[in-house]
Amino acid sequence: MHVFNSRTAGFVVNESYFHSPEPTVYADDEGDYADPEYVPKNPSYEWQWTLGDVVSALTAAGLHIEFLREHPGTVEPRLPGMVLGDNGLWDLPDLAGRLPMMFSLKARPGPARRTGQRRAGPPAGART
């Protein structure tokens, strides 16, 4: 993680990046991410999936990854303080162009699996 400066404060992480079997629950009193004026009537239960979780699930399903790209901004202001950049993407001013904010992936059906082929995932015996 050499991209982070461990000597200065300022980068705050509120939730784990890694998947948890328990969902994060968002109250029904906040605006929806797609429309801040819309307030859902019920709480939202959401799970975090890592980039590795996504790629591993696709390959385990027999899909062939054609490309995986990381992008330095998002198509909507997902976090407070984001600004629209010259590239047409939203980013945090202090981190602009320094961390991926979204990814794109293209997959297609892969060749049929051979019997006994190991599924994608952690190495046998690895603790998860």
Image (tube, rainbow, N blue to C red):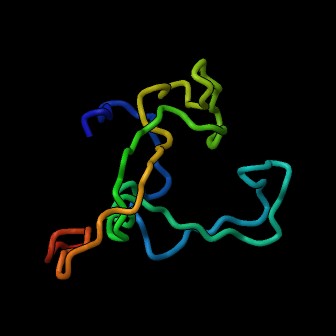
Q: Quadrant of the C terminus?
A: bottom left
What residue appears at the point 17 percent right and 81 percent down from the top-left corner? 116
**Is 100 or 61 nearer to us in this picture?**
61
Report the label total: 0
Residue occupying the point 55% across, 25% down: 93
Residue sitting at the far front: 111
Q: Viewed as shown, does residue 29 lie left or right of 60?
A: right
Give residue 23's quadrant in the image.
bottom right
Q: Residue at x 75, y 55 (%)?
A: 32
Residue 24, image x, y percentages: 56, 67
Identity of the residue furthest to the top in this view = 86
Which quadrant of the rendered structure holds the N terminus?
Answer: top left
Q: Position of residue 89 (x, y in %)?
A: 60, 30
Task: Say whether residue 69 is left or right of residue 111.
Answer: right
Query: Residue furthest toward the bottom?
Result: 115
- Residue located at (63% from left, 43% from top): 78
Percent of width and height locating residue 113: 25, 73
The percent coordinates of residue 68 (x first, y second) are 38, 45
Splitting the image into 4 quarters, where does residue 38 fall?
A: bottom right
- Name the foreground residue: 14 vs 101: 101
